[in-house]
Amino acid sequence: MTIADEHRAETPLPAPGEILHSGAAEYPGLDQWRSLPLKQQPDWRSHPDFDAAYQELSSNPPLVFAGEVDKLKARLAKVAAGEAFLLQGGDCAETFDGVTADKISARVKTILQMAVVLTYGASLPVVKMGRMAGQYAKPRSSDTETRGGVTLPSFRGEIVNGFDFTEESRIPDPKRMVTAYHKSASTLNLVRAFTEGGFADLRAVQQWNKGFMENPAHAKYEQIAGEIDRAVRFMDACGVEFDGLKRTEFYAAHEALLLDYERALTRIDSRTGQPYVTSGHFVWIGERTRDLDGAHVDYLSRVRNPLGVKLGPTTTPETALALIDKLDPQREPGRLTFISRMGAANVREKLPPLVEAVRDAGAQVVWVTDPMHGNTITAKNGYKTRRFDDVMDEVRGFFEVHRAAGTYPGGLHVEMTGDDVAECLGGSDVIDESAFDARYESLVDPRLNHKQSLEMAFLVAEALTQVT
Ligand code: PEP
Ligand code: MN
């Protein structure tokens, strides 16, 4: 299959869905989560602005539509079957100030650049998804933070409170949910304009990749970069002109952590009568909130979006199978994605029992590697960081485990940015700790910068040519 096939490989798609009315959905069982253990939420129900914020979100238009969500599920079914690859990337935590044309376009550009390289490496279509347009809520290890004898609520992402360590900023404010909704709407609007309006043209993306290759540090990727360039020039010379060359699908994903927000943005699809979370196409449940009897698993089991679940090194095969039973009882291909985040030191030991149990149970999940969250360290100068080599080691381990089990390594989930930040260590154009003071921007976890992200795509492309 050539790059061009990415755009030809059409899946039979469901009819477009409509969500015509606004208003928080009424559906049997949808509010069951309210009586279950609920972790990682701000204590804000008695805040004087809570009801008004919730009502406003409930009556706002949906950010995404059921038909798009179903289309994504069909795409993910292809990934589950080993016929496509999934790329999920973006900030650990989006910020309101980060909603600018420059930052959004740099991030989308980087994801598109990575996707071209991966498409070539896998010889398969790549489903592109941003941790974007809704990635505002963060789980924290502690409810409070103490500095110099002062204890305040922890920062839970800008959808809940502010990062500044003052009482005013740290008190959870429900009106922030409405701001997050509008910021997500503008982000999504720009992403749709970019990816539908010519910005994603494969030939332009290839030109950007040439910029990356001009850096002598990246000379080792010359062969594969040259092959991609020839493939694109060949199509151009043949006069290949088709829609898929100029546009691409791009989906929005975030952690469905803040259930007040997700509940208020849930709508009933008028076509199927089923509930959908309309805050994003794909939502995932984090490592800290995936309790089988908890509120998050219950709530998300009742909506029709494709779902992810993060699986860390303590996950047992029994838990993985129980999550499948709860979240994907119909064994619907594309419904469930397991995002493993074991750490480079654990992946080769902890992932195989899970992959084998799921394989032997006959369940069709998408397996994705998040090589970031199991590899976080503290740098000597106090910054939270990750080593590029550890990240790549986990990716390699993930591929090895799937090759040994005869299962399909379906994709990558990374914290990355399109900007030239210094947050993760290493890469061929080396970042070291001395750059952190000037170029460390993330409020929460460290991200791969533009060059490190593309370098990862080249390395994964090399690994993919060995598995496909
Ligand atoms: C995250 O994706 O930013 C995150 C908090 O991950 P995890 O749930 O895997 O810890
Ligand atoms: Mn993170």
Image (cartoon, rainbow, N blue to C red):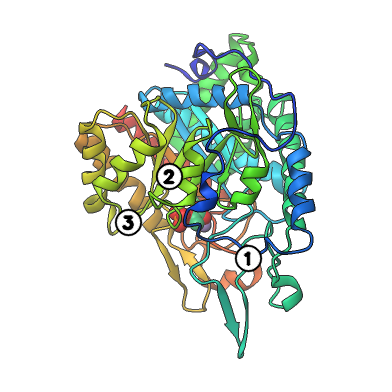
Foreground: 195 or 315?
A: 315
* Image quadrant containing the N terminus: top left
Tell me residue 53's x, y (percent).
77, 52
- Crowdedness of circle 2 by 10 Å Cα count: few (<14), some, many (20+)? many
Tell me residue 450's x, y (percent).
58, 49
Please report the residue visible at 21 percent of the width from the left and 38 percent of the height from the top.
Answer: 356
Between marks 3 and 2 in the image, the one whose residue lies nearer the viewer: 2
Residue 43, disc: 1
Please report the residue visible at 42 percent of the width from the left and 54 percent of the height from the top.
Answer: 287
Q: Is residue 136 left or right of residue 306?
A: right
Foreground: 22 or 406?
A: 22
Foreground: 95 or 271?
A: 271
Mark 3–mark 1 CB contact (< 8 Å): no
Please report the residue visible at 24 percent of the width from the left and 50 percent of the height from the top.
Answer: 348
Residue 454 in sight from this viewpoint: no
Marks counted in the figure total: 3
Foreground: 119 or 142?
A: 142
